[in-house]
Image: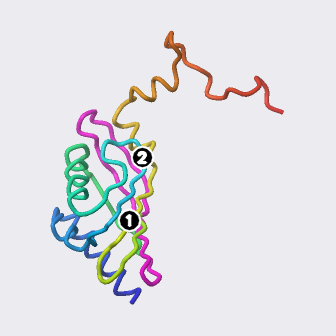
């Protein structure tokens, strides 16, 4: 069973990398949930196929995937973990990022019911440029940068 699940997930990556998003979407359960933490415009929690289609559309509009390698797929029953590397370019800024990633999937009845994406989300989000939220967090009312550490001036 684990071997079959590994091959199933590998085939879905092949479909994604060839641009066949419909094949990926048809293998998601009706109650599918995708959690991609981070600060990029396409990050967040998505539910169902239509929200995943929106995710893939946002990803395509925001980033050119320069390289995406699936280095390993590990399965234990209905849990499958894919591990890889990616390089991309943010269309709006022209900035490049490179990060390892891991995707953790849960399968049920021949469909993927959930996925969690882990990567260096700061490296990716920073390529989109400094956000207003980041500026507010780092600056006061006079736009003076605060120290990153707000404890005592010396560490013991």
Label 2 sits on residue:
38
Circle 1 crowding by C-alpha within 10 Å: few under 14, some 14–19, many from 20:
many
The quadrant of the image that shows the N terminus is: bottom left
Residue 61 pos. (x, y %): 20, 45
With 99 as the anchor, is 88 left or right in this view? left
Q: Secondary structure at mark 2?
A: loop
What sort of colour scheme is used for the picture?
Answer: rainbow
Magenta stretch contains residue 6: no
Q: Nearer the viewer, residue 50 or 147?
A: 50
Q: Which residues are magenta?
A: 74-102
Q: Quadrant of residue 50?
A: bottom left
Residue at position x 79%, y 31% from top? 155
Q: Is residue 116 above or below residue 151?
A: below
- What is the secondary structure assignment of the residue under circle 1? strand
Which one is earlier in the sequence, the residue at label 2 or at label 1? Answer: 2
Residue at position x 28%, y 72% from top? 29
Q: Main secondary structure of the magenta part?
A: strand
Q: Position of residue 37 (x, y in %)?
A: 42, 50
Please identify the quarter of the rendering in which residue 111 is found: bottom left
The outermost residue toward the front is 31
Q: Residues within 10 Å of mark 2 (few under 14, many from 20)?
A: some
Spatial CA span between label 2 and label 1: 15 Å
Q: Quarter of the image for the C terminus: give it.
A: top right
Q: Position of residue 27 (x, y in %)?
A: 24, 74
User: Going by the picture, which residue comes out furthest to the top?
Assistant: 142
Query: Disc 1 designates what residue?
Result: 115
């Amino acid at each position: 069973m684990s071997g079959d699940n590994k091959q199933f997930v590998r085939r879905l990556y092949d479909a994604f990398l060839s641009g066949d998003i419909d094949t990926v979407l048809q293998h998601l359960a009706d109650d599918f949930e995708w959690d991609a933490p981070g600060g990029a415009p396409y990050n967040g929690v998505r539910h169902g196929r239509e929200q995943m289609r929106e995710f893939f559309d946002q990803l395509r509009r925001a980033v050119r995937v320069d390289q995406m390698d699936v280095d390993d797929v590990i399965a234990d029953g209905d849990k499958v973990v894919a591990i890889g590397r990616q390089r991309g370019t943010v269309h709006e800024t022209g900035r490049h990022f490179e990060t390892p990633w891991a995707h953790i999937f849960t399968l049920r009845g021949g469909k993927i019911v959930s996925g969690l994406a882990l990567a260096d989300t700061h490296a990716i989000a920073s390529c989109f440029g400094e956000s207003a939220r980041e500026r507010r967090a780092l600056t006061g009312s006079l736009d003076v940068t605060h120290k990153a550490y707000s404890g005592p001036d010396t560490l013991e």
